[in-house]
Amino acid sequence: MEKISIQDFIAKLQDAFENMEDVDIKPETNFRDLENWTSLNAMIIVAMFESELDTSITFSQLRECETVADLYNLI
């Protein structure tokens, strides 16, 4: 699978999170600092990588990420 653009990745993140459609997310955004962030979002990210991006990530890898760009670099 060809790597998607960062803008498409951000769109997938916003689609995955029901409570973040109107949040302005940028590559440098620290996703844990988002007002609507919950621990459930971590599980959603792991599932999104598997189902939408055909890539597996671990919770350990996710914990090492701080920004949306860090997540994108896991693809």
Image (cartoon, rainbow, N blue to C red):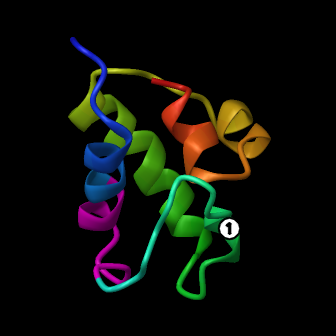
Mark 1 secondary-structure assignment: helix
**Residue 62 is a magenta residue:** no
Establish if 5 lies above or below 34.
above
Position of the N terminus by quadrant: top left
Establish if 2 lies above or below 68.
above
Residue that numbered label 1 is attached to: 32
On the image, which quarter does residue 58 sit in? top right
Q: Report whether 55 appears left or right of 31.
A: left
Establish if 47 lies above or below 1.
below
**Residue 18 is a magenta residue:** yes
- Residue found at x 60% / y 88%: 35
Position of the C terminus by quadrant: top left
On the image, which quarter does residue 38 sit in? bottom right
Instruction: Residue type at mark 1: give it.
Output: Arg
Q: Which residues are magenta?
A: 13-21
Residue 7 lies, in percent from the top left, at 31, 49
Question: For the residue carrying disc 1, how many other residues have a C-alpha within 10 Å: few (<14), some (14-19), or many (20+)?
Answer: some
Residue 39 lies, in percent from the top left, at 61, 68
- Residue found at x 45% / y 49%: 45
Frontmost residue, 68 versus 38: 68
Q: Report whether 9 appears left or right of 44.
A: left
- Residue found at x 73% / y 33%: 60
